[in-house]
Image (spheres, rainbow, N blue to C red):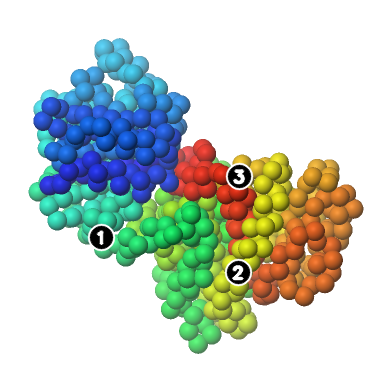
Amino acid sequence: MCGIVGYIGKKSASPILISGLKKLEYRGYDSAGICLQTAAGLELVKNKGRISQLEKDLAVRDFSQSRIGIAHTRWATHGEPSVINSHPHFDCLGQIAIVHNGIIENYQALKELLVKEGHKIVSETDSEIVAHLIEKFHQGDIEKALRRALQLLIGAYGLAVLSQKEEKIIVARKGSPLVIGLGKDEILVASDVPAILAHTKKVIYLSDGEIGILTAGGYQIKNSAGQILDKKIEEIKWTVDQIEKKGYKHFMLKEIFEQPQSIANTLAGRIKNHQAKLSLKTDLKKINRIIISACGTSWHSALIGKHLLESIAQIKTEVDYASEFRYRDPLLYQDDLLIVISQSGETADTLAALRQAKSKGIETLGVVNVVGSSISREVDSGIYLHAGPEIGVASTKAFTSQVAALTLLSLYFTQQKKLVVDKKIISQLANLPEKISQALALAPVIKKIAEQFKDSRNFLYLGRGFNFPVALEGALKLKEISYIHAEGYPAAEIKHGPIALIDKNMPVVFLASKNNLSAKIVSNIEEVKARQGIIIALANKGDKIIAKLADYLIEVPDSLPQLSPIINVVPLQLLAYYIADSKGLDVDKPRNLAKSVTVE
Ligand code: M6R
């Protein structure tokens, strides 16, 4: 949800800011802008549309001498995507510029107050009022003015502020991520690490309530009371190489094909002598119930996690959308464990669910990909996915790594409870990268199938047991990148309504790999076939019954049912990808979406 970059140093700021913005474009891409401090004052260039447009607009001006600037790529919350609503925003005199990620909830009241006082507010955004509030309190010291402005704000913000008169960038955080990169004679700030990775791997994560004062010569981090803090400098492990497309047409395709490696990374060092090895602070023996809270794709992996934890570790597990959990005042007990799952570690609802459980004294555990993210820092203990940066807006490799991590956790839990561990699960888990490679080899077959369905208007995805969440995930992948309406259902449920949708134009994807419900799935396929639905079936090699029933067959590698979601989702990711690509859509930047949802 919006990306911020700032630069102060000895180099020309504009190209650094633009390349940083490009790395953050996954956070929002409906408009972009940049503000540079120059000898003539603050210069603003902004436009509707992609960063490539902004780059063209900048190319006709010479800002090569400017060494300080802030920039923004937007995902609209308040006000349509337009030039006027895009960031940076100015105060009345054009001497203070701000970029903002988050939502100012009380902006209407503040706007009325500012307008009464004579401020000229030109955009429909919640963000612009911040520039005017700073102006209102400004008496020569931009930091002091920002502090006073922040006292009035209700909501979430990652803010970077630039003044015409001071050679510094001031940043502030509450709820929206900000990371400060410490380079040689230069300092960067950004909403996420990829924007600064080409310049430095030394970073400081700003926490809520903190303010950073960045100058070419150094930095200070202060708490809300104005005291200087001695923050830990952390070293980023990601490489620049990992955030490039490396010859793939899209990041999503690259990330799908990275899955043998990303799963191997999730498992690395965590399986030894037929045992799952995790170092968790949580004493799992004390836990009687688990609640898993997450959003989107991470919520789908939570549903699989429930099956795994209940069937392998015999522990009662509930799953809740984070957006519901946080406002429902759920009944919690002291022997509960809340697990939050998040690729980004910044999803606003998931973070709020975590904070709510913590406020009630409940033990928490995170399953997170991005190291140093807010969720990873606030949980009591956690499992990092080590899946590497996921840039494509549609989550792929994070999902399979999440499910692998939850399998490890279930096995670890079983060991802690001194229950018998199924050695077959452990050995097949270790063998997953090989199975994923086999599933990826299906790409040419799936591409051909995809071409047949690029003009379909609707899709149904049906699965049972461990594979019902995979049906949900397959449908989500298709709708978010191809804009084709798709629904996932437990296969038996279609008789209770959705079967009315089936006719000769309805493709129905069946997750029909072998498990204890195989015979039931065959009956469900028959029911759809009897109504002329088009059957696309994922089945194991040699399954003659399904092969006979299917109009299109995708032969997936066999596995234990517990591990089948990780394998079966791969063809569904490819199917969604090839359908969207054959429609000529921008797969990595689907309309209306953003990678990291830091607003509720
Ligand atoms: O970063 P998170 O895992 O917390 O993100 C949760 C969802 O926003 C995310 O999974 C979203 O649904 C993706 N676009 C799915 O592809």
Pointer 3 local density, CA inside 10 Å: few below 14, some 14–19, many at least 20? some
Q: Say if disc 3 is inside 8 Å of ligand 1.
A: no
Q: Nearer the viewer, mark 2 or mark 1?
A: 2
| Front in this rendered view, residue 382 or 100 | 100
Q: Amino acid at mark 2?
A: Ala
Q: Which residue lies most toward the bottom here? A: 273
CB atoms of marks 2 and 1 within 8 Å:
no
Residue under circle 1? 201
Question: How far from the left and from the top, in percent, is residue 102?
Answer: 38, 37
Q: Residue 190 versus residue 323: which sits nearer the camera? A: 190
Q: Which residue is mark 2?
A: 441
* Foreground pick, 508 / 51: 51
Q: Residues within 10 Å of mark 1 (few under 14, many from 20)?
A: many
Q: Residue at x 25, y 60 (%)?
A: 201
Q: Is residue 293 left or right of residue 486?
A: left
Residue 284 % position (x, y): 50, 70
Task: Say if 152 sits above or below 55 in the image.
Answer: above
- Relative to residue 53, is residue 65 drawn left or right? left
Helix, strand or loop at disc 1? loop
State the quadrant of the N terminus: top left
Which residue is the site of mark 3? 583
Residue 23 lies, with reference to residue 14, above or below; the image says below
Q: Spatial distance from mark 2 to mark 1, Cα to Cα?
A: 36 Å
Q: Is residue 469 above or below residue 352?
A: below
| SS at mark 3 in the image | loop
